[in-house]
Amino acid sequence: MNALSSNVSRTIQTRLVLPPDTNHMGTIFGGTVLSYIDEIAAISAMKHSRKVVVTASIDRVNFLSSAEVGDILTLEAFVISTGRTSMEVFVKVESENLKTSTRTLTTTSILTMVAKDSKGVPSPVPGVIPETEEEKELFKTAQVRKRRRLEMRNEQTKREGDLQ
Ligand SMILES: CC(C)(COP(=O)(O)OP(=O)(O)OC[C@H]1O[C@@H](n2cnc3c(N)ncnc32)[C@H](O)[C@@H]1OP(=O)(O)O)[C@@H](O)C(=O)NCCC(=O)NCCS
């Protein structure tokens, strides 16, 4: 399987923040942003693998600023790196106030998506060739993040086993 440029999976979505997406202060719910992040990460991973994908994990998400009713959210995603069947996907969310034209970084997130075959078994994916400085920086540190993630998963599995 030939490795693909991160550009193959690069995906951009814009969304309007509407009243049903917001709390009583008129700012967007974190869970709504998370669902947007999950969806764009899945699209990006599907573009890379051309397979059905599931979310294996979402790394810590910090909401650096909020978005208000009427703001435009721009989400951007690309596959950073891959293992045999998993893809690490970077997602960045910016909000834009249309009256002031101010753009603010709302959050960034890194998710792991796993490709599956028609029987639901994890299925191989192509590698990644990072090209831009941002892609190369994130690619360099991917293995360390993957190791930490799997350690955390094993700790959680053990903890839940102990509680049963
Ligand atoms: C994630 C899932 C596919 C892992 O399946 P598994 O049987 O443990 O398979 P494996 O151990 O072979 O792991 C497959 C890949 O997932 C990765 N992986 C598994 N758990 C992970 C986790 N918690 N975080 C990040 N990566 C993970 C493995 O490192 C492996 O990657 P690689 O092939 O690139 O090395 C499986 O647990 C699953 O389907 N979970 C439900 C996913 C889902 O439905 N998500 C939607 C929200 S509920």
Image: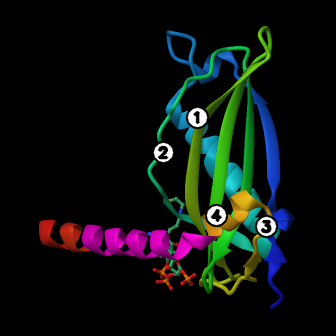
Residue 88 seen by the camera: no
Which is nearer the eye, 164 or 38? Answer: 38
Closer to the N terminus: mark 2 or mark 3? Answer: 3
Relative horizontal placement of residue 4, taking residue 32 as reference (left or right): right
User: According to the image, label 2 marks what residue?
Assistant: 61
Measure the alpha-carbon separation of dots 2 and 1.
13 Å
Q: Residue at x 80, y 16 (%)?
A: 101
Q: Which residues are magenta?
A: 140-157
User: According to the image, label 4 marks what residue?
Assistant: 137
Q: Which residue type carries mark 1? A: Thr
Task: Report x, y in % for residue 12.
Answer: 81, 46
Task: Report x, y in % for residue 141.
Answer: 54, 69
Q: In which quadrant is the C terminus drawn?
A: bottom left
Closer to the N terminus: mark 2 or mark 1? Answer: 1
CA neighbours of label 3 inside 10 A, class few (<14), some (14 to 19), many (20+): many
Residue 144 colored in magenta in the image? yes
Of tags 2 and 3, the one toward the viewer is: 3
Closer to the N terminus: mark 1 or mark 3? Answer: 3
Q: Which residue type carries mark 4? A: Glu
Q: Quadrant of residue 32?
A: top right
User: According to the image, label 1 marks what residue?
Assistant: 32
Q: Which residue type carries mark 2? A: Val
Give the SS element for disc 4.
Answer: helix
Count the numbered circles shown.
4
Q: Which residue type carries mark 3? A: Ser
Relative horizontal placement of residue 49, taking residue 142 as reference (left or right): right
Measure the alpha-carbon separation of dots 4 and 3.
13 Å
Measure the alpha-carbon separation of dots 1 and 3.
26 Å
Residue 26 seen by the camera: yes
Of tags 2 and 4, the one toward the viewer is: 4
